[in-house]
Image: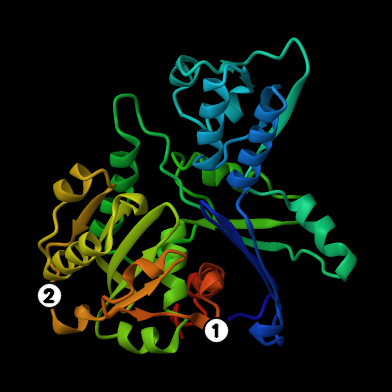
Amino acid sequence: MGDRPVLALDIGGGTQDILLYTPGVPVEGCVQLVLPSPTVVAARRVRAATARRRAVWLKGTIMGGGAVVKALQEHLQEGFPVYAEPRAARTIRDNLEEVRQMGIRVGEEPTGEAVVVETRDLDLPLLGRTLAPYGVELPPLILVAAQDHGEAPAGVSNRAFRFRHWRNFVAAGGQIRELLYRRPPHYFTRLLAIQDSALPGHEILVTDTGAAALWGALADPRVKQWAGEGITILNLGNQHTVAFLLEGDRVWGLFEHHTALIDPAKLAEMVDLLQQGELTDEQVYGDGGHGCVIDSGYRPRAAYRRVAVIGPRRGMAKGLGYFEAAPYGNMMLAGCFGLCLALRGKEGNGALYS
């Protein structure tokens, strides 16, 4: 997968999947971890504070919402206060006035005892301390995948704003190597916060979790074989579902939805319409998803009827006849494998999935 040691992290809504790739060591022998995601860890701290009837003080930077936001809402409903530093408060909403309207005291410090909940997606010092007793050091090159809706302008839905990025990507040619960033667009504030977590001497490249899953699926030999002719790659994540129409290194179209709003029948229908080139942005967005885009040059072919499915919620696709991709025999680390292969393509060391 490359000639440099790499720390790859795929940060999802339920788990954070970690690979320390060492050149010359079989992948099966590299350090691999599946841990609760940072938002789940933070949510547990909030719920512990609720149980102790204590105030919560959010300190840190922007991180993924999801579980921690739900826990904070429940904490407020129980009548206990939440304080937040402005940067940490953006974990909840980009618009701080909306955060204040929820009852969160932004920029205020608690007057009494409060439980501090640190907000950050990447804690390299903690990971380094955890691995040090095993004689494992963090390499200087770090690759991180996380989903970022982007900081939407006032009056623009964050769902619509996030999908605008996908739409622009497809319109620009859909080359998947362009999705691994040495510096992401300015509106991806979560990814920027992750990069700002770098320690001296470390370099962090970032991407979207959907892109990492796409690359990871291509690490499966069967998917690699099919991709040259055209294939549909489906990632069923804990929070989001995304399907790509891929030929070679080019994405011709995709849809993105919330996994909780999908059942097997709806999933099969959306995938079928996507393959036919008939799924519309209005259908997906109107159903509570992020959207759909299909390039005007896309032409349906039998090859695209093949679907490779990946992700922790792939069980939803049981019975649909999809191929369950398992790169290196470990589906849960697919995003990490994908990050390493994406780096290879980014640096011009061959095709992304060679």
Q: Where is residue 170 shown, x and y percent of the image?
A: 26, 59
Does 123 appear above or below 110? Answer: below
The answer to which of 235 and 227 lies nearer the viewer is 235
User: What amino acid type is highlighted by mark number 1?
Assistant: Tyr
Disc 2 residue crowd, few under 14, some 14–19, many 20+, Cα 10 Å = some
Tell me which corner region of the image, top left, top right, bottom left or bottom right, holds residue 84: top right
Q: Where is residue 320 shown, x and y percent of the image?
A: 26, 75
Residue 65 left/right relative to 85: left
The answer to which of 61 and 348 lies nearer the viewer is 61
How is the structure coloured here?
rainbow
Q: Are marks 2 and 1 in contact (CB under 8 Å)?
A: no
Disc 1 residue crowd, few under 14, some 14–19, many 20+, Cα 10 Å = some
Residue bearing the label numbered 2? 300
Q: Where is residue 133 shown, x and y percent of the image?
A: 89, 65
Figure quadrant of the N terminus: bottom right
Circle number at residue 328:
1
User: What amino acid type is highlighted by mark number 2?
Assistant: Pro
